[in-house]
Image: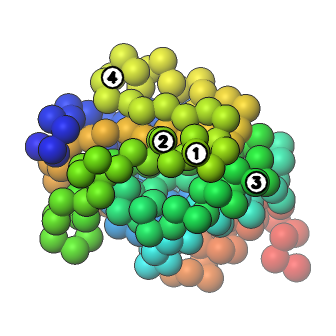
């Protein structure tokens, strides 16, 4: 279990958020967020960054600005979010109304050996988000809080940032496609139609 005695399962949380996603776009950071989103159902509206650590929120911001009629949900781990805190400030300055940043927070660096991370040692990503100018933030620790937050995540006036405290329980790896050009083309076609590659 994580330092905060979290009870939520990361895989179940991500699946619930994406359960009625409509046309929402999902951007994922490396490692577990990618596996969690893929396990919820690989589709052309998912864009996996794989090894581009630190870039998920900025990619999400670019998409939200370019596609203002589509919801963009970024799934990122707490370790990567700490690496890219400046991206939260950039999002807050641009104020995209259609962007949600979901931090899946197990308070550990899962990719490098489960060392305790900043989020489990007193650093609040929600408070950082508030401080840089996010109008809507939420800390989620229970299923009831998750259920109460689903509409905010999917439809709330952004930018929205939610941090979901989850256990460190391992989940089976769910590998989506790893071919970068294929993922790019598939995602582009999902956004712009079949003529997008011409």
Q: Which residue is mark 2?
A: 127
The location of residue 89, given as percent across then percent down, is 64, 57
Q: CA distance from mark 3 to mark 1?
A: 12 Å
Image location (x, y in percent) of residue 177: 46, 71
Q: Which mark is residue 93?
A: 3
Residue labelled with disc 4: 143
Q: Which residue corresponds to mark 1?
A: 131
* 175 left or right, relative to 129: left
Looking at the rendered image, the disc whose residue lies closer to the viewer, 2 or 4, is: 2
Of callouts 3 and 4, the N-terminal one: 3
Q: Nearer the viewer, residue 154 or 185?
A: 154
**Which residue sits furthest left?**
1
Helix, strand or loop at mark 4: helix
Nearest to N terminus: mark 1 or mark 4? 1
179 lies above or below 80: below
Of labels 3 and 1, earlier in sequence is 3
Report which quarter residue 78 is drawn in: bottom left
Q: Nearer the viewer, residue 17 or 119?
A: 119
């Amino acid at each position: 279990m994580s330092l905060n005695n979290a009870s939520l399962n990361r895989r179940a949380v991500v699946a619930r958020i994406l359960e009625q996603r409509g046309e929402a776009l999902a951007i994922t950071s490396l490692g577990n967020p990618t596996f969690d989103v893929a396990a919820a159902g690989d589709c052309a509206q998912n864009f996996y960054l794989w090894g581009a650590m630190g870039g998920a929120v900025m990619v999400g911001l670019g998409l939200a600005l370019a596609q203002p009629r589509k919801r963009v949900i970024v799934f990122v781990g707490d370790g990567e979010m700490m690496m890219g805190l400046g991206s939260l400030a950039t999002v807050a300055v641009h104020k995209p109304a259609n962007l949600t940043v979901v931090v899946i927070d197990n308070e550990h660096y899962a990719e490098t050996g489960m060392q305790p991370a900043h989020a489990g040692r007193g650093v609040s990503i929600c408070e950082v988000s508030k401080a840089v100018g996010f109008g809507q933030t939420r800390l989620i620790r229970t299923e009831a809080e998750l259920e109460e937050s689903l509409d905010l995540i999917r439809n709330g006036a952004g930018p929205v940032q939610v941090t979901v405290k989850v256990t460190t329980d391992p989940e089976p790896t769910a590998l989506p496609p790893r071919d970068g050009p294929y993922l790019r083309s598939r995602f582009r076609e999902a956004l712009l139609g079949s003529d997008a590659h011409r």
